Image: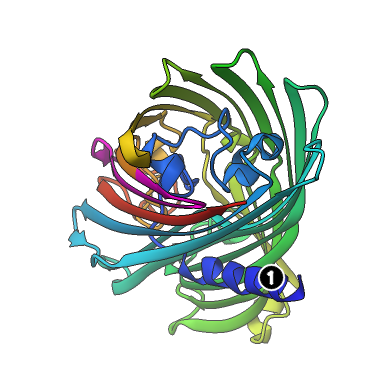
Amino acid sequence: MKRFVFVLIVAHSCLFSATRNVWSNGVIRDSMGATSSGRGGTNIGHSDTGTIILDNPAAMVNIHGTGLSEFGIDTVITDLDYTDPENNAATKTRPGVLPEISIIRKSSDGRWAFGLGAYAPAGYSATWTLNSPLFGTNAYKSFGALGKLMPAVAFRVTDQLSFGATFGVAVSHLEFESPFFLQTGAVRGVPGILDLKGTGVTPTWSVGTQYQLSSRTTIGARFIGKTQFDYDGRFRAKVLGLGPQPVESNFDAEIELAWPSSAGAGIAHWLGDCQRISADIVWYDWSHAYDKMGLTLTNASNPLFTNMLGPVIKDSFPLGWENSVSVRLGYEIFLRNCNVCRVGYVHNTRNLPSSTLTPLIPATLEHTVSVGYGKQWCDWRFDFAYQYSFAPDRTVGTSALVGGDFTGSAIEAQAHWINLSLMRQF
């Protein structure tokens, strides 16, 4: 067990470091693992993959056999283009690899199930070289990652009804580097070069339930709590406009930001012995998570800042994201010789307003189509999935951000996912 826990911690660190170029519903992934990804991200009403720990822990008591172990690799390749009156830029295409690990064990009587999983359910990254009339040519870089290490438990109340819950640890890291205009207070409109890094750790939890309506139909529901972070990091500023030369200083920084809570419901239904359809609908509370990013700066290395602005500097970066809904549809056909083929579709409603859209968080993807394939060999199963995500081009009229740096800009985004997983059932 010690060795297994160590492997999960290492895998979690890999997830944290590898989460790049991920944009789906806002910055939340549409699906985890090859099985769910092939059928359009539907998983709340299912019990055939280890990622149910993340999507609905109540399903753990409904898996076949006494348990399972699963390891998956998800690879994403993105294609982003950004234009504004001064720029016409495209990001470099580079794959990002995200592993995940799940293990589930049931009690001898089948009433209880216990699980442990490591996942990277959300993140974003972008790197641009853009020209600004005020700052000249500069790098615009962003990185945000969310990783979760999740112990889980489930209990079968009746032959039809089960409940489950997770309580674990979430780790998140943020980085931003770009020209920046201070947004609030006495320093509103002061231009500078932002170089910000911060890391936070906080508890994470979820609850879920599943109910067997009939031998062919299962329904489920789950709720994932908001993960509120106070990131501790460093802020390096090069501020223009406070003197004849740029004024530089380092600060201790505290950033306030959250990853949203979500509520979902799903159904899985067998059309016959060989065909299954499923649907999930998931609501995300972005309005209480990505409303704004609070920033507190202390311990300036340059006393000029302390003398002019005091020992504590507070700023707030407006985001103004809106709540969104993700609709996921999947179809599977089970063929001879233990083969299964899958197709799926995901639609995400728009949650990022055009007025605060920037190339730093280009979370604009709205549609995803997927195909998948699975093959069983005795107790082992291999699954493959491919997803293509895209969205209409997004444009900004007059930016709501102070400084007008992104007024008149446009972003085009698409992404390709390749998912592989290997599972052993006991």
Q: Quadrant of residue 69?
A: bottom right
Identify the residue at horizontal 83%, vertical 26% (top origin): 157
> Is 384 included in the stretch rendered in magenta?
yes
Residue 401 in percent (x, y) is at: 44, 48
Q: Is residue 269 above or below residue 156?
A: above
Residue beneath the point at 39% across and 34% down: 40
The reply, left or right, for residue 258 in relation to residue 333 is: right
Magenta region: 374-395
Magenta-drawn stretch contains 243: no
**Picture coordinates of residue 216 (x, y %)?**
54, 16
The residue tagged 1 is: 4
Q: Residue at x 23, y 39 (%)?
A: 393
In the picture provided, is 284 more to the left or to the right than 19? right
Using the image as rendered, state which of residue 347 and residue 410 is in the foreground. 347
In this view of the protein, which residue sits in the foreground, 160 or 403?
Answer: 160
Please indicate whether residue 289 sits to the left or right of residue 58 in the image. Answer: left
- Evaluate whether residue 399 shows in this view: yes
**Is residue 391 rendered to the left or right of residue 123?**
left
Write down the quadrant of residue 197 in the picture. Answer: bottom right
Secondary structure under tag 1 reads: helix
Q: Would you say residue 127 is visible in this rendering?
A: no
- Tell me the quarter of the picture where residue 146 sits: bottom right
Q: How is the image coloured?
A: rainbow
Residue 213 picture location, percent across and down: 64, 13
